[in-house]
Image (spheres, rainbow, N blue to C red):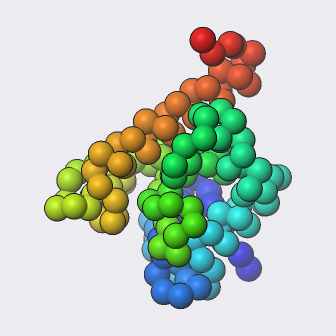
């Protein structure tokens, strides 16, 4: 059975070749799929393709590096990549489950709403920028769904 991203999902991180570390609000485990495969399957499960979600995000935000993805709209399951999408080490972090970000040497400590945390190999300001992009993606997408124009 394949893993589907849900409201409990905090992060999908690379663990080993062809495996992922799934962090949920009340659980953590290793699965036999890459983070990319989890994202692709989850987007398909919710009625789109991963590539379609990437194209949609780029159309909303403009072509940006490390583009966030709306996995599912109604639950606002928005995830941002920890590295370039082409990287074998790319992981995915849930935007709506982040409480805070702290500098951790040249990396970042992501603190989730439930108090759990994870250190990712991504500079602090890069993570802050990712959160800003997710916020913009959420706001513009919501406005469009509600028939509001973005100036």
Whether residue 20 is visible: yes
Give the farthest residue toward the bottom: 17
- Of the 4 image quadrants, the one containing the C terminus is top right
Residue ID at (34%, 59%) = 122
The image quadrant that residue 137 belongs to is top right
Residue 44 lies left or right of residue 29; in this view the side is right
- The percent coordinates of residue 73 (x first, y second) are 69, 40
Whether residue 29 is visible: no
The image quadrant that residue 43 belongs to is bottom right
Residue ID at (36%, 53%) = 112
Residue 9 lies left or right of residue 2; in this view the side is left
Residue ID at (55%, 83%) = 19
**Rendered position, 7 above or below 35:** above
Residue 27 lies left or right of residue 35; in this view the side is left
**Rendered position, 68 above or below 27:** above
How many numbered tags mark residues here?
0
Give the farthest residue toward the left: 105
**Rendered position, 119 above or below 103:** below
Residue closest to the eye, 81 or 102: 81
- Of the 4 image quadrants, the one containing the N terminus is bottom right
**Rendered position, 143 above or below 102:** above
- The percent coordinates of residue 6 (x first, y second) are 62, 57
- The percent coordinates of residue 93 (x first, y second) are 47, 57
Residue ID at (34%, 64%) = 120
- The percent coordinates of residue 113 (x first, y second) are 37, 49
């Amino acid at each position: 059975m394949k893993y589907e991203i849900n409201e409990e999902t905090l992060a999908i991180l690379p663990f080993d070749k062809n495996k992922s570390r799934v962090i949920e609000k009340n659980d953590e485990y290793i699965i036999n799929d890459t983070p990319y495969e989890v994202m692709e399957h989850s987007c398909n499960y919710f009625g789109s393709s991963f590539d379609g979600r990437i194209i949609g995000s780029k159309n909303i935000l403009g072509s940006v590096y490390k583009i966030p993805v709306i996995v599912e709209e109604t639950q606002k399951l928005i995830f941002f990549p920890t590295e370039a999408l082409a990287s074998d080490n790319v992981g995915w972090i849930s935007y709506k489950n982040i409480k805070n970000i702290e500098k951790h040497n040249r990396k970042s400590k992501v603190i989730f709403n439930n108090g759990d945390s994870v250190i990712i190999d991504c500079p602090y300001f890069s993570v802050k920028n990712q959160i800003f992009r997710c916020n913009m993606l959420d706001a513009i997408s919501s406005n469009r769904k509600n028939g509001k124009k973005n100036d």
